[in-house]
Every structure is written in structure tokens, then in C-alpha cells.
Amino acid sequence: MAAGNEDAKGITVKSERELDLMREAGSIIAEAKAAVKDALAPGVTSLEMDALAE
């Protein structure tokens, strides 16, 4: 992140664009986690799970 985005306590203040990007990233991760969870079953290899997660 760019310098200068901190308040007086040193807490980084995110712009609305940064927050939107973080929300989008969170949604992508949630979808990936759900897909992996749904595919998890006896006999499914870790290699198959890795391929699904990518």
C-alpha cells in the first residue's frame, strides 16, 4: 500500500476502491473454499483438490 494512508494511531485507512477490491477478493476466496469443500470426499486425492483450488 502507498505510504501516507495512516491515521494518527498508525492504523492504515483504506480507500473505497481498496475496500471494494478486498470485498471482491473475499468473494473469490469464499467461492474457492466452497468448491473445495463440496468436492472433498473419500478417495479424492490432494492433487485433485489442488487442481480444483487453482
Image (cartoon, rainbow, N blue to C red):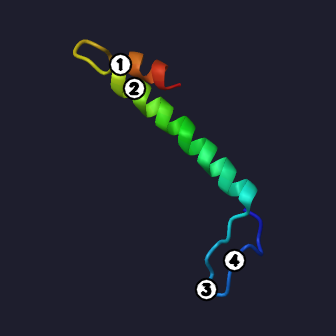
Describe the element under mark 2 as helix, strand or loop.
Answer: helix
Q: Are marks 4 and 3 in contact (CB under 8 Å)?
A: yes
Which of disc 2 and disc 4 is earlier in sequence?
Answer: 4
Where on the picture, by quarter, is residue 18? bottom right
- Is 37 or 52 nearer to us in this picture? 37
Which of disc 3 and disc 1 is earlier in sequence?
Answer: 3
How would you rate the neighbour count of disc 3 (Cα within 10 Å): few for under 14, some for 14-19, many for 20 or more?
few
How would you rate the neighbour count of disc 4 (Cα within 10 Å): few for under 14, some for 14-19, many for 20 or more?
few
**Hey, what amino acid is under mark 1?**
Ala
Give the labeled residue for mark 3.
9
- Tag of residue 39: 1
Give the labeled residue for mark 2.
36
- Residue at image coords 48%, 19%: 51
Q: Are marks 1 and 2 in contact (CB under 8 Å)?
A: yes
Q: CA distance from mark 4 to mark 2?
A: 37 Å
How would you rate the neighbour count of disc 1 (Cα within 10 Å): few for under 14, some for 14-19, many for 20 or more?
few
Q: CA distance from mark 1 to mark 2?
A: 5 Å
- Tag of residue 5: none
Which of disc 1 and disc 4 is earlier in sequence?
Answer: 4
Give the labeled residue for mark 4.
6
**Hey, what amino acid is under mark 3?**
Lys
**Hey, what amino acid is under mark 2?**
Val
Q: How many marks?
A: 4
- The quarter of the picture where the N terminus appears is bottom right
- Residue at image coords 60%, 43%: 25
Q: Are marks 1 and 3 in contact (CB under 8 Å)?
A: no
- Residue at image coords 40%, 21%: 49
